[in-house]
Amino acid sequence: MRPAHLSLGSSDIGFDRKRDGQDDAVIRRGSPAEASPEQRRVLDDLADRAEAQATAENFPVALRILPRRARENLMHTYRYARFVDDVGDAAVGDRLALLDAVEADVRALWTGGARLAPVTGLAGLVADGLPAQPLLDLIHANRMDQTIRGYATFEDLLDYCQYSAAPIGQIVLHMPAAPPRRTSPTPTSCVMPCRCSSTARTSERTRGPDGCTCPERTSESRASVVPRCARLWRGPALRRVIGRQVRRAWTMLETGRRARRSVVGLAADRGSRLRCRRSRDGGRVAGCRLRGSRGSGPTDEAANRAPCPAVAGRAVTAGATLPADIAAAYRTCEQITGDQARNFAWGIRLLPGTKRRALSAVYAMARRIDDIGDGQLSAEHKLAELAAARRAATDPTDPDDPVQVALAHAATVLPIPLDAFDELVDGCEMDVTHRSYRDLTELIDYCRCVAGSIGRLSLGVFDPPLRGDDDAEAKRLANTLGVALQLTNILRDIREDLAAGRVYLPTRDLELFGVELRTAVDGSLDPQDGRLAELVRFEAARAAGRYDEGLQLLPMLDWRSAACAGAMAGIYRELLSRIAADPTIVMRRRAALPTRDKLWVATRAMARRG
């Protein structure tokens, strides 16, 4: 039975708002009509299309780091907004009649009679108290698109945005996982760059040669600036006008920055900010539609790379459907990563599918190598196992090993330097022989093997478009960042490593601070009158300097790769800061960040790249 609080009449969800200067034709006339069989077919086709378009946007519709319920709510909101927009922009037939049918279905949502999939998906939000008005406003905006050919002033355009963009923000603010409500211009400003980026295309394709969404007159002078976009097609005057609108939108986005300090808000305006940055002068939108670089697929050069033997004859491009065994191999690697990479997995979640799978394959192989070095076998057997792992990692040819199959495929579509696994195995062999390190130089050499190699492998997955000196610098910074992460691991695991008979802190530093690592009766490390705490702070300061250097890599990467690297490095850097603030943590137990803090670090990584 439908909950009682969902019962409301037509007067509660009426849609009779009328603004001065609007044509009566765009205001709903009477009750909306039910859809005919032909209209239902058209609407069902558009509903299927909306489902398939979520991955084609300039922003991640529902970030993987969000709680499951928040992701589902955002996806349902996207499907509905995309569906309504497609009805207004791409439907064949009487679009006003189709929009009436959509409104009738929306109203039926409160009486249990909704039929269209994008509408019924909102039932959960309605049960949580979502009002009808934002849903109806989006329909009204598309009615306006059918009859209004242009806007005389910027204020008129903003009035239109109150129907076409602001409702999205209102829906998000009603989500249970949304941040506390606050007034923000962000929803309206998000549509401004979209309008600017599609002005030329929309004028010709959907509104005819006389259609335009740029205001004809400025609010200050009321002087005619853009009589019709078609008259200024690709001309300097049009670029100046569009550039002005972009600057206005940029100012509004910056004004609303505080309201975007949430995971939901970061995703919401990603595409808009990107468009603003790329078209502030209006020169990039007069003849084409801007799209953000998703960084999700390989370059043409990568797609033509010779396949590894384990995947010979298989599909090797990111856009191709993966064969069942390769897809299953990737799933195995992703499961290994999710189960065992507590910090690493947070960054991987931010990558697009192709890179996320590839980095999971890299991690799964690296984990296998690391587990051999940390296992219970004798030193002789470990070295033999490491030799076999070296061959498997640098030349993955076994079609029966899912990790090798996934790694081979990943190395085919992305420039992953598999020879970096050689150095990883070298570092694990150092662990097996219980090698000690006299000074920082020797320790850095070890860190470069076991962690700098991972940095260079990850850089291959990120695949930044760099050449020559820039490429060499990126590899150096990736190596430095990996070393910083490993130095953090060493400080975090001092107590556990000592129990395993390993001491990674340089002998010279131990002598300098008068420290001899030993365990107390209760299993904690002997603080030695505070000398061990001073040594930990000293080593932490060294590691922090390498973070400062290594993080210079991020501006060289695409947004999602930079967010991934920034999230992983940010988690370890935050852990290092806490160890430096209270070194006694590592003396008692293995230091770790709570999940909520990891989520916050990942969010900040996205904010810095947004």
Image (spheres, grey):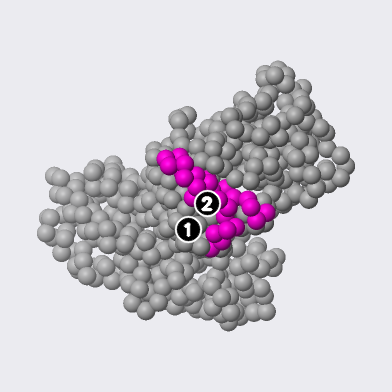
Q: Is residue 74 left or right of residue 544?
A: right
> Considering only order in the chain, which callout, 1 or 2, is on the residue closer to the N terminus?
2
* Badge number at residue 226: 2
Percent of width and height locating residue 419: 44, 78
Percent of width and height locating residue 38: 86, 45
Q: Quadrant of residue 325?
A: bottom right
Along the line of sight, which residue is nearer the eye, 500 or 251? 251
Q: Which SS does the magenta portion mostly show?
A: loop
Residue at x 41% of width, y 73% of height: 466
* Badge number at residue 237: 1
Percent of width and height locating residue 395: 52, 79
Query: Badges 2 and 1: C-beta atoms under 8 Å apart?
Result: yes
The quadrant of the rendering that contains the N terminus is top right
Q: Is residue 280 left or right of residue 326?
A: left
Please say whether residue 564 is one of the residues in the magenta stretch.
no
Residue at x 15% of width, y 64% of height: 508
Identify the amino acid type marked 1.
Ala
Residue at x 78% of width, y 36% of height: 101
Distance from disc 2 to disc 1, alpha carbons, whole Å, reads: 8 Å
Identify the amino acid type marked 2.
Val
Q: Is residue 434 above or below residue 28?
A: below
> Counting other residues with Cα less than 10 Å from the Cα at mark 1, is it few (<14), some (14-19), or many (20 or more)?
some
Q: Is residue 444 visible?
A: yes
**Which contiguous range is marked in magenta?**
208-234
